[in-house]
Amino acid sequence: MYKYYIGFLFTISLVTINLIFPQLTLADIKIQLLPLAQMPASSKSISPKAALERLFTTKEIQKEWFATEFLAQIPLEKMQQIINTIKTQLGDYQNVQNNAQDYLIIFSQGSVPTKINLNPKGQISGLLFEPPQTKLTSLKEATTQFQALPGQVSFLVQENKTVLAALNTKTPLAVGSAFKLAVLQALKLEIASGKRAWKDVMQLQTNWKSLPSGILQTWPDGAYITVQTLASLMISFSDNTATDTLINLIGRQPIELVSPRNRPFLTTRELFILKGSENRDLLKRYRTSNETQRRAILQELAKKPLPNVSEFEGNNPVALDVEWFFTTEELCGLIEQVADLPLMSINPGVANPQDWQRVAFKGGSESGVLNLTTWLQAKNGKSYCVAATWNNSNAPVEESKFIALYSGVLAKLAANK
């Protein structure tokens, strides 16, 4: 999985969201215009807060407000587009507030947690817009807004076992890479039984390699990798090759016991091949076959090459009935069972880890599909699960709107805990 640092407001950071398909859309949740670790100390000639306020109160931003190295990465006209898009999506600018060591830019319809650094000349040398947060008065309002989205939506908020908000929580929907929670739970059960161990070593095999997201598809055949490393890459980077390696290690049957609806339980490689443009006949057969016939078709797929990754960079949903299906109730149950594993906190997703004692996250997406599932432990010991899934077989989902709404729910919970 890749992480993009580009100049479109709210372009999805794929590492953050953990998608199965490496598609890039105008649905930014995070842009980092210069690595924060490289940012110099801020200048005293203008405060960071004032610099942010100036960006959103001036009709046209000025070249001299930015460091040369900043503009080398993000041209001035692109930065102006970013500012304009923020204001269009979130409404009228109101003010900038301190947010721990960083800042919160407040708009009439939401807010954007932001990090900024200035060079000694008072110019912006680093800027990070975190996931935007829709302004919500209540979880009921969030439920209403989720329900208004086109297509099918499932939404669940739990505090411990108490349901705080619910919408179609028993409806199975396609969830993209969030299915990897089931793979992890099956692996955890095998480790608990003594059948596997985190230190077990696997060798990377050609016929287990998949398309991005991930990095292992580029590693040499025969490379030795521990089970713990595979699981960590599967969750934190949504590495599809790591996932398929674990599925082949565990076997379909144990995973199908965890997720009986998804039979046969597909690997990511199989899904890519089925949805490849050269395999439309196979896809048609698969969609109309029973379980036994589908298992036979998967044997045929083993001889097929992977399609080119560019085929999955478009925006048209393809066969959303061939996917992994879970209810939000099931996703909350799964993430609760694996939340104690340290690897689940490597990537916190859209949550702010500073607001919580512990965060576990997994999400997933393909065109027409988006899921975000987060388990959170508050500093007072209470635990929460927030799971939301959106499917639309007729058009790509509007990721920016969905993610801003989801982030607003997390912010609401953090404010009330």
Image (cartoon, rainbow, N blue to C red):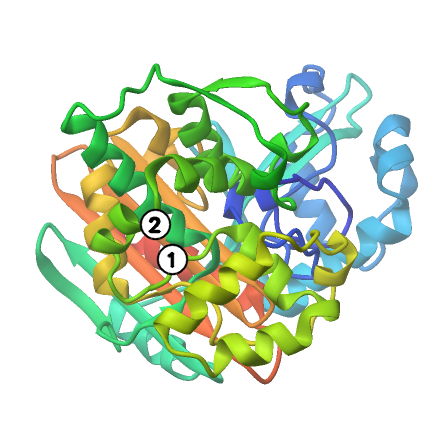
Of the numbered discs in the image, which one, if any, rests on residue 409? none
User: Is disc 2 surrounded by few (<14), some (14 to 19) or many (20+) residues within 10 Å?
Assistant: some
**Image mark for residue 265:** 1
- Where's residue 377, x and y in %? 21, 38
Residue 53: image location, x then y, percent: 65, 46
- Say the numbered circle drawn on residue 252: 2
Relative to residue 89, is residue 342 drawn left or right? left
Measured Cα–Cα span from mark 2 to mark 1: 6 Å
Residue 416 in view in this figure = no
Task: Check whether the beta carbons of the residues at disc 2 and disc 1 lie within 8 A of each other.
Answer: yes
Q: Secondary structure at mark 1?
A: loop
Residue drawn where x is 38% and y is 76% of the image: 153
**Disc 1 residue type (three-letter):** Phe
Residue 342 located left or right of residue 66: left
| Identity of the residue drawn at 48% across and 51% down | 267
Q: Position of residue 98 (x, y in %)?
A: 47, 37
User: What residue is shown at x 23% (from left), y 49% (from top)?
Assistant: 334
Tell me if 380 is positioned left or right of 93 in this view. Answer: left
Q: Can residue 148 be seen from the camera position used here?
A: yes
Q: How many marks?
A: 2
SS assignment at label 2: helix
